[in-house]
Image (cartoon, rainbow, N blue to C red):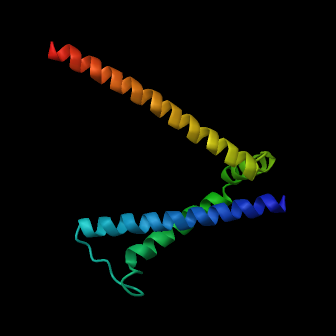
Amino acid sequence: MQGVQRYVVFAYLLLGVLLWATLSKILGALAFAINAPDYEILGSDFTLTTVVGLGLAAGFSYFAFKNERWYGFSSEVVAELKKVTWPTKDETRTATIVVIITTLIIAAILGVFDLVWGALTKLLLSV
């Protein structure tokens, strides 16, 4: 279970960092929109809205980590993902080539249909 817990903790830390980046930008834009001062704390990149965003993100991440229901769900997701059989590099390369070739064939077929339909439309409209 230690391996699962490591991934869950990392996911919550990553969630906190992403939430911090998002909240600091949203709060900075909100402060600018209402003409509220955004005081610089440690230079122009670390302002009051950045600190407030950090506090909110840290609080939410801590709440999510300590919430038994959310933590349990996250642990179950990680445990299920460990059971997944991921494709090998060769399988991924083969599947990618098949997708590219299929896309090119379908694009050619649609191109032919477009040319035929355009010619028919031009013929009908010119009469």
Where does residue 120 sit, x and y in percent of width and height?
28, 17
Q: Is residue 99 left or right of residue 106?
A: right
What's the residue at 30%, 69% (across, down)?
Answer: 31
Q: Is residue 62 visible?
A: no
Where does residue 67 sit, x and y in percent of width and height?
66, 55
Q: Is residue 50 left or right of residue 77?
A: left
**In this orientation, which residue lies closer to the viewer: 18 or 117?**
117
Determine the residue located farthest toward the left in the rendered image.
127
Where's the C terminus, which quadrant?
A: top left
Determine the residue located farthest toward the right in the rendered image.
1
Q: Is residue 120 visible?
A: yes
Q: Is residue 9 left or right of residue 52?
A: right
What's the residue at 75%, 64% (across, down)?
Answer: 6
Determine the residue located farthest toward the bottom in the rendered image.
42
What's the residue at 27%, 77% (across, down)?
Answer: 37
Where's the N terminus, which quadrant?
A: bottom right
